[in-house]
Amino acid sequence: MKIVLLGYMGSGKSVVGEQLATTLNYSFLDLDNEIEKNAGMPISNLFSEKGEIWFRRKENEILKEIIQQDPKLVLATGGGTPCYGDSSSFIQLEKDVISIYLKTSLDELTHRLFSETTHRPLIAHLESKEALKDFIRKHLFERAHYYNQADLVIETDGKPVNAIVEIIVARLF
């Protein structure tokens, strides 16, 4: 079984994914890291030098390559991965793939991401908490349709990583 974690940036996909993979004795990959390795540069540079359209095409291509490889895999996707191209339908239709949406509230995402704006290219230009909250609100509205197509939805607010992993394992097995 392949487990694909979906959710907005800051929802915990990478942290939860690593711990979930360890718990299940699965491989773990972070899609953003794999894109960086493949392209030979950080995502922030890819966005600024090649543009978002190029990035989304590369993201879709690498997503498909990864999912068709390792049968025991936990994959943390980027926040926008399921929203572009045919990524969402590919994830849903691929055999032995379970998608999990790590659903995190607007307030929690704003709290988690405000101190990280300089490290995340999509929000680096936002200087106030209110501007960040408005940006996230707009994205969540646009992306909810894709996120909610996941096989499982796990609420993450107020839960430590190990509790989220336990909930996922209980729901899967």
Image: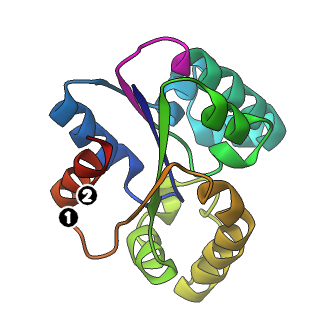
* Disc 1 and disc 2 in contact, CB within 8 angstroms: yes
Position of residue 55 in the picture relative to residue 153 (left or right): right
Depth order, front residue of 132/145 = 145
Q: Which residues are magenta?
A: 66-75
Determine which residue is flagged by label 2: 164
Provide residue 156's location: percent of width, then percent of height. Answer: 34, 67
Q: Quadrant of residue 113?
A: bottom left
Pointer 2 local density, CA inside 10 Å: few below 14, some 14–19, many at least 20: many
Determine which residue is flagged by label 1: 160
Q: CA distance from mark 1 to mark 2?
A: 7 Å
Provide residue 31's location: percent of width, then percent of height. Answer: 51, 32
Where the C terminus falls, by quadrant?
Answer: top left
Work out whether 81 lies above or below 133. above
User: Mark 1 belongs to which amino acid?
Assistant: Pro
Q: Quadrant of residue 19?
A: top left
Residue drawn at 30 percent across, 51 percent down: 171
Q: Secondary structure at mark 1?
A: loop
Work out whether 9 lies above or below 54. below
Depth order, front residue of 2/18 = 2
Counting every numbered tag in the picture gives 2
- Colouring rule applied to residues: rainbow
Q: Which mark is residue 112?
A: none
Provide residue 105's location: percent of width, then percent of height. Answer: 47, 77
Residue drawn at 40 percent across, 49 percent down: 13
Position of residue 109 in the picture relative to residue 16 (left or right): right
Residue drawn at 61 percent across, 64 percent down: 123
Residue 72 on the magenta span: yes
Position of residue 7 in the picture relative to residue 22 (left or right): right
Q: Secondary structure at mark 2?
A: helix
Q: Marks 1 and 2: which is nearer the front?
A: 2
